[in-house]
Image (tube, rainbow, N blue to C red):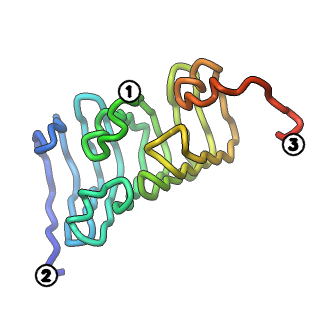
Amino acid sequence: ENDTLKASVNLATKERSGLNAQVLKTELRIHPKLMEFSQLYLKTDRSELKDYFAMKYPSMASMSDFIHAVTMNGHFDNSTISSDDIAYFAPTIKDWNRRFIIDGTVSGTVDALNGTDVYINAGNSTSLNGNFSIVGLPDINKAFINVEAKDLRTTYADAASLVPSIKNVTAVNLRQLS
């Protein structure tokens, strides 16, 4: 615990990458391999996160390889996450232009992400209630997506905007879905 910083935080700041935190309220804990935000409320220009978020890493230098080396663990309560804000730390997704509303638990690295008991709203008509795993981000066209859905709703337009390679599917074999 001699290498741990704990603080009750209530501030507004602009991170050196350019991320504008209009409000950051949290019980913060930082040590050489963890950054933890409990009782979190973060409002940026495009996102609003509530509840809990932590990043674990072998060393602070690992932040330069955020996509592969930083393990995230979050429990989100009706939170809005913009891909534009994530892009400050994972620049390869800067062109996604996506906004997600999420409720539930998400963990893993950007390139191996898991969601448990989540409700996600993405796009205009897409929502998921269930579990998911995505391996291969940030390249959505090469990513493997596994969904265990209690309820999944989408439209072709939303699906094609979220996973552009769907536009290349010309025939669907529904027998393979059973």
Counting other residues with Cα less than 10 Å from the Cα at mark 1, is it few (<14), some (14-19), or many (20 or more)?
A: few
Residue at horizontal 51%, vertical 39%? Answer: 140
Marker disc for residue 178? 3
- Is disc 3 placed on a helix, strand or loop? loop
Residue 144 in the image: x percent, y percent? 60, 47
Q: Please tell me whether residue 63 is drawn above or below residue 44 in the rendered image.
A: below
On-image quarter of the N terminus: bottom left
Residue at horizontal 38%, vertical 58%? Answer: 68
Residue at horizontal 23%, vertical 34%? Answer: 44
**Earlier sequence position, callout 1 versus callout 3:** 1
Q: Do residues under tags 1 and 3 come within 8 Å of each other at their CB atoms?
A: no
Q: Please tell me whether residue 36 is drawn above or below residue 25 in the rendered image.
A: below
The amino acid beneath tag 2 is Asn
- Is disc 1 placed on a helix, strand or loop? loop
The residue at which mark 2 appears reads as 2
**Earlier sequence position, callout 2 versus callout 1:** 2
Counting other residues with Cα less than 10 Å from the Cα at mark 2, is it few (<14), some (14-19), or many (20 or more)?
A: few
Residue at horizontal 42%, vertical 43%? Answer: 77
The part of the image, by quadrant, that contains residue 69 is: bottom left
The residue at which mark 1 appears reads as 97
- Is disc 2 placed on a helix, strand or loop? loop
Which is more toward the observer, 157 or 75? 157
The amino acid beneath tag 1 is Asn
The amino acid beneath tag 3 is Ser
**Earlier sequence position, callout 2 versus callout 3:** 2
